[in-house]
Image (tube, helix red, strand yellow):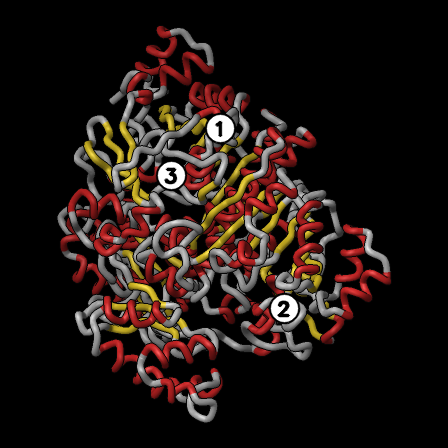
């Protein structure tokens, strides 16, 4: 299914969910002029390219002619049964071209693209790109100033590098999944989303931006190598230092926290949930006032964190009973009026009702040709002078073949038609 | 244990962010983590702390004999600490002088706090129009909840992640770590800062970055919002298995009482698992070879995989999965991680001689790995005010007399 290049340029309306339209001055985009080739699949790695695209980089997604990125089919169908909402959301701001990479002609075209690009993003299993002659030494030789981001479950080196490692596996390997769940019970998924893929991509984007700065100063590109597992391990506070020094193995802590009480999730009378986090004695004092039980915060009772930790169940019981006697709105109101850190445990339905998400532009509604209205998370972080923007949702497979092969690589229409016939594109 | 570690503080290379001066006036993990990452790549990070007690991160976690916790020693790596009372008029003036000499400022006070001290964006931008300022709060600088107190736990709840963690209809749980949103927002903040620095270098124009803890979590919920908007389906907690799109996909216990994660996103991967299980017939199209069938009969499939996993030790399951190319991995605890060959080979744990406490501290190495300009840990978290004199002399040219005055009036 090949669409003319104009499809990618088709005007689509964009607004935040409150109806305010968001205008984006393309000239102000801080990464304008950068060209990124994204030859990855799914999220780990490609999400880094999405961020660069939000801030103005031109992102060219290179996909296999036969079906393209499997993210197109992974998840919930949009109004077009062949395209998932995952794809529309996370492949934002891209042009799609098709290329049958392992073929000699496909590789030849890919090399020409590398020659004209600043960043290459890939997440094949380590060894795959090498088998095609696209390992780092080769890529570097083709374009000495290119920055290559490689994200894989285990990284490009080490004994497990060739293992298949999805985000879910790699975040388990990195130590996150072991920590989710009740103590001694089955470890649960730390949220039913591949959080490790996103975290690895954030580190990857930082690596690319740092490397681009180095390139601007020296002309030399480099390789950015991220193992998803190590990105996850890096954000687990002091668990490595504490194990090394004291042999302390962190275990699952359920809905609570080992270092503070009360610090967890509590059920309200209307069968919803709130999070309350009293990290300090002062916050517990405020909570006790909100609960109408200021006596609980007396120094000789539960005023000290150490006393609360020792009497964890009793303290939590007070909070459980109090929260359980009120509606969520009432709990929130009482806590906020005393400046107690509190929040709804929001479902996605709650989020759509929440005025703060709307005010911050966190839900962006777009009207896309062929897909109708699609709501996706907005761009973060918010930059005051050069905000990012969503210029388009996930493209149709090969929508920019003409544009990229013709305008960028200078191929004639007949040449492109030949490539299509030979299934190179 | 030591054999899994690399004893190294890499030779100090200037790093790709050399020459960038970062003022980190923030506390705990969120905005400081942005400064930490920048420091690993060579930025000069000056940590500005309250003279009385300093950053609360010094008390967060397991204490060392020095008083400061291991979290502090690890996460305040490469930073220089100065004390400065921003509430005092003279302290605020010194701070402004530092801002005039800085490229980046990281802060995460509650909204309005810096403004109250006369140190809001407008003032600082006037002092240094090239400044890039990272502002992280629970809810951001705008919107109806901007003044609410926000911690990562609250952000996980508000951003929709906690709701998705736990057994079906059971208590929503912590998504693995109570500071996840802090770290993630530090990463987003760092991306914003690096983009803004690039813009600054081209145009000379500084700007601020407004990041909210809950937004980082919400941004990483894949198609959750799109699906709700289109179909009004509310994603729920699914415990240790998630079979909306892939089956099997979850955690399974092994014969030796450990856990493995197995995930078969495609039919090909399930065929490999069936082979690892020595039951290739499971992957016949008439049985469970097709994802749609597996999703519809997820209970059966999970039971079959569960029975297999519980019949073998973890090592054997992983060996067979590796042999067949099945995506599987251990649910590592930190002890597993310390004994792991991959972690050793990648040098993910760096051991550093902390002279002032006569201990070796093991800390996670910088991520990501850059081939030409790798990040480094050149020092661990400093003592409170360890570099006050050094920095104020070097950056602002203060002399001994001036430093004494400031010290006498408890400004530093």
Residue B246 point in image, percent of width and height:
25, 51
> Which residue ends up furthest to the right in the rendered image?
B400
Question: Quick check: A41 above or below B117?
Answer: above
Same chain check for tags 3 and 2: no
Residue A82 point in image, percent of width and height:
20, 34
Badge 3 crowding class, 10 Å Cα cut-off, few under 14, some 14 to 19, many 20 or more, is: many
Q: Which mark is residue A41?
A: 3
Dot 2: element: loop
Question: Quick check: B290 above or below B160?
Answer: above
Who's the residue at 50% across and 32% down the image? A120
User: Would residue B287 appear left or right of A198 to someone viewing this image?
Assistant: left
**CB contact under 8 Å: marks 3 and 2:** no
**In this rendering, the label closer to the viewer, 3 or 1:** 1
Report the Cα–Cα distance between label 3 and label 2: 45 Å
Report the Cα–Cα distance between label 3 and label 1: 30 Å
Same chain check for tags 3 and 1: yes
Quarter of the figure with residue B253: bottom left
For the C terminus of chain A, give its image quadrant.
Answer: top left
Same chain check for tags 1 and 2: no
For the N terminus of chain A, give its image quadrant.
Answer: top left
Q: Which residue is mark 2?
A: B54
Q: Which mark is residue A28?
A: 1
Residue B300 seen in the figure: yes
> Which residue ends up furthest to the bottom in the rendered image?
A300
Quarter of the figure with residue B260: bottom left
User: Would residue B265 appear left or right of A232 to someone viewing this image?
Assistant: left
Who's the residue at 60% across and 53% down the image? B35
Dot 3: element: loop
Report the Cα–Cα distance between label 1 and label 2: 39 Å
Residue A93 point in image, percent of width and height:
38, 31
Badge 1 crowding class, 10 Å Cα cut-off, few under 14, some 14 to 19, many 20 or more, is: some
């Amino acid at each position: 299914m090949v669409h003319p290049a104009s499809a990618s340029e088709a005007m689509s309306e964009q607004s935040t969910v409150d109806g305010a339209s968001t205008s984006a001055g393309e000239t102000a985009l801080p990464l304008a002029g950068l060209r990124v080739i994204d030859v990855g699949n799914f999220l780990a790695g490609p999400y880094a390219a999405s961020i660069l695209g939000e801030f103005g980089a031109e992102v060219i997604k290179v996909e296999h002619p036969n079906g393209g990125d499997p993210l197109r089919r992974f998840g919930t169908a949009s109004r077009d049964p062949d395209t998932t909402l995952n794809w529309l959301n996370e492949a934002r701001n891209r042009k799609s071209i098709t290329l049958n990479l392992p073929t000699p002609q496909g590789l030849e075209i890919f090399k020409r693209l590398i020659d004209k690009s600043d960043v290459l993003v890939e997440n094949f299993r380590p060894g795959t790109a090498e088998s095609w002659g696209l390992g780092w030494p080769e890529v570097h030789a083709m374009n000495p100033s290119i920055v290559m981001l490689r994200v894989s479950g285990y990284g490009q080196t080490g004994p497990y590098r060739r293992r298949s490692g999805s985000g879910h596996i790699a975040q388990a390997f990195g130590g996150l999944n072991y920590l989710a769940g009740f103590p001694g019970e089955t470890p649960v998924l730390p949220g039913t989303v591949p959080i490790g893929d996103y975290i690895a991509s954030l580190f990857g984007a930082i690596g690319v931006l740092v490397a681009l700065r180095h390139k601007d100063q020296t002309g030399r590109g480099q390789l950015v190598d991220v193992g998803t597992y190590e990105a996850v391990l890096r954000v687990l506070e002091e668990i490595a230092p504490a194990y090394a020094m004291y042999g302390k193995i962190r275990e699952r802590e359920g809905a609570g926290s080992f270092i503070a009480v009360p610090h967890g999730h509590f059920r309200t009378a209307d069968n919803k949930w709130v999070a309350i986090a009293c990290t300090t004695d002062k916050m517990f004092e405020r909570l006790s006032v909100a609960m109408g039980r200021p006596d609980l915060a007396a120094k000789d009772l539960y005023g000290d964190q150490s006393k609360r930790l020792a009497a964890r169940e009793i303290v939590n019981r007070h909070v459980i009973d109090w929260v359980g006697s009120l509606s969520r709105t009432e709990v929130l109101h009482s806590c906020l009026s005393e400046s107690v850190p509190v929040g709804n445990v929001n479902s996605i339905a709650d989020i759509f009702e929440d005025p703060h998400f709307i005010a911050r532009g966190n839900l962006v509604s777009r009207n896309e040709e062929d897909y109708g209205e699609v709501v996706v998370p907005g761009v973060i972080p918010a930059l005051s002078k050069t905000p990012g923007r969503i210029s388009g949702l996930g493209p149709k497979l090969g929508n920019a073949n003409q544009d990229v092969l013709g305008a960028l690589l200078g191929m004639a229409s007949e040449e492109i038609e030949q490539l299509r016939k030979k299934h190179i594109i | 244990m030591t054999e899994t570690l690399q004893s190294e503080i890499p030779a100090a290379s200037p790093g790709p962010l050399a020459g960038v001066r970062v003022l980190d006036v923030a506390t705990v993990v969120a905005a400081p983590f942005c400064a930490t990452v920048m420091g690993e790549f060579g930025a000069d990070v000056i940590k500005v702390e309250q003279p009385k007690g300093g950053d609360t991160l010094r008390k967060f976690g397991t204490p060392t004999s020095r008083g400061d916790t291991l979290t502090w020693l690890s996460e305040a790596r490469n930073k220089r600490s100065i004390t400065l009372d921003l509430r005092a008029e003279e302290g605020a003036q010194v701070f402004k002088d530092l801002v005039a000499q800085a490229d980046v400022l990281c802060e995460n006070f509650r909204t309005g706090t810096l403004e109250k001290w006369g140190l809001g964006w407008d003032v600082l931008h006037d002092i240094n129009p090239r400044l890039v300022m990272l502002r992280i709060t629970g809810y951001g600088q705008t919107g109806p909840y901007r003044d609410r107190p926000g911690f990562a736990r609250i952000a996980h709840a508000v951003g929709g992640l906690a709701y998705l963690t736990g057994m079906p209809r059971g208590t929503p749980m912590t998504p693995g770590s109570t500071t996840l949103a802090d770290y993630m927002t530090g990463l987003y903040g760092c991306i914003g800062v690096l983009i803004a620095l690039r813009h600054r270098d081209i145009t000379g124009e500084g700007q601020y970055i407004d990041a909210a803890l809950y937004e980082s979590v919400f941004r990483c919920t894949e198609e959750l919002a799109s699906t709700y908007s289109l179909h009004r389906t509310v994603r729920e907690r699914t415990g240790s298995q998630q079979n909306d799109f892939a089956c099997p996909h979850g955690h399974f216990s092994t014969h030796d009482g450990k856990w493995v994660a197995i995930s078969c996103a495609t039919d090909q991967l399930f065929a490999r698992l069936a082979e690892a299980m020595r039951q290739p017939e499971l992957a016949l199209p008439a049985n469970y070879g097709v994802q749609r069938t597996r999703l519809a009969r997820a209970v059966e499939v999970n039971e079959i995989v569960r029975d297999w996993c519980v019949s073998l030790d973890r090592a054997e399951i992983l060996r067979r999965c590796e042999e067949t190319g099945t995506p599987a991995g251990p649910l590592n605890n930190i002890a597993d991680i310390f004994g792991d060959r991959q972690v050793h080979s990648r040098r993910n744990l760096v051991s550093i001689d902390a002279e002032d406490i006569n201990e070796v501290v093991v800390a996670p190495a910088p991520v990501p790995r850059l081939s030409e300009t790798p990040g480094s840990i050149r020092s661990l978290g400093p003592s409170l005010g360890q570099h006050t004199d050094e920095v104020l002399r070097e950056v602002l040219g203060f002399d001994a007399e001036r430093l004494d005055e400031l010290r006498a009036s408890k400004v530093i």
